[in-house]
Image: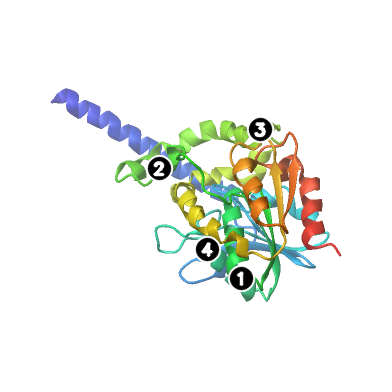
Amino acid sequence: MKWFLGTLLIISVTLAALFAYGSGEQAELEAQFPPIGQRMPLDGFELHYLDVGAGPTVALLHGAGTNLRDFTSSIVNRLVRDCRVVVFDRPGHGWSTYPNQRWMNPAEQAAAIRQTLRNLGIEHAIWLGHSWAGSVVMAALLDYPNEVTGGVLLSGATYDWKGGVDWPNHVADIPVLGPLFTHTILMPAGQLLMDRSIAAAFAPNMTTPEYRVRTGIDLALRPSQFTISGREVRLLSDFLATQSLRYRAITQPVLMIHGREDEIVPARNHSHKLIKVLPQATLRELPQTGHAPHHAHPDVVAREVARFGCSP
């Protein structure tokens, strides 16, 4: 009995220490990476966005697990030379809150982005989505053809895939164990593994200097964002299996920018399939480029996007 009580005490103290460490690190991260834009109240939640520049509008939507700083640290300063840029924290990421529902699918997120743009007086815009947010752009092209005048898919996810997803995307929703994991082990373990995850996304490119500091990507280690991001990744394939059946109805121009060496969202399963059903689409493949073309080649990406949606 003494052995059992002693073990229980050690476990309890360890978990309490991990909880305190995670809470402290979260507070430091949120102080280091505060909101840099405005908040738009919607139905039960808020979207954090940054609205800069002048000209035709481009809406920028980041991928899973990141936030709007992914773009402010890469292509926003280049795009504002030709465009009005509205860059978003998608629901539950960065400083955007989440509605009271288990999962907000890409079509529902597209509706929230569209409403925010309308509230800003923007009637027409090009939408750009990186990675996971490619699904949101495709939903917007389908549902709002008179307002979304074109779509840019930056390593965009557009089709379902075979196989599952990595185990961290499941763990947060396991009863009892999930919340215990996200509030104790997640922060220290995630901090140790973050550089490796970033390197995998960039490969074969080198990680750009100060990427982790400039993007605030460690905000993804907060329990709420980690949980939401895991659901997004886990549930996306089934959603795309249905949404992709409608793609032939899209009439707007579409630009796809994809790294040839991207193994996270491979072009062969996404852009290569989409180009076959959208004759008006353009595919720009970047050689020796991974899943972060806007960081590996920011000038090239910004120039392609501006030429597509902003330049005369």
Mark 4 lies on a secondary structure that is helix
Of helix, strand and loop, which one carries label 3?
Answer: loop
- Helix, strand or loop at disc 2? helix
Q: Which residue is mark 1?
A: 144
How far apart, in angstroms, are the residues tagged by discs 3 and 4?
Answer: 30 Å
Question: Gap in Å between the C-alphas at discs 2 and 1?
Answer: 32 Å
Whether label 4 touches label 1, CB < 8 Å: no
299 and 67: which is toward the camera: 299
User: Disc 2 or disc 1, which is closer to the eye?
Assistant: 1
Can residue 225 be seen by looking at this rendering? no
Asked where in the image residue 51 lies, by quadrant, the reply is: bottom right
- In this rendering, the answer to whether 296 lies above or below 160 is above
- Point out the image quarter for the N terminus: top left
Quarter occupied by residue 44? bottom left
Looking at the image, which is closer to me, 226 or 2? Answer: 226
Q: Residues within 10 Å of mark 2 (few under 14, many from 20)?
A: some
Name which residue type carries label 3.
Ala
x%, y% of residue 103? 43, 57
Callout 1: 10 Å neighbours few (<14), some, many (20+)?
some
Query: Of circles 3 and 4, which is in front?
Result: 4
Q: Amino acid at mark 2?
A: His
Location of residue 256 with respect to 248 vertically, above or below = above
* Numbered label attached to residue 203: 3
Sequence-first tag of 2 and 1: 1
Residue receiving disc 4: 107
Location of the C terminus (image quadrant): bottom right
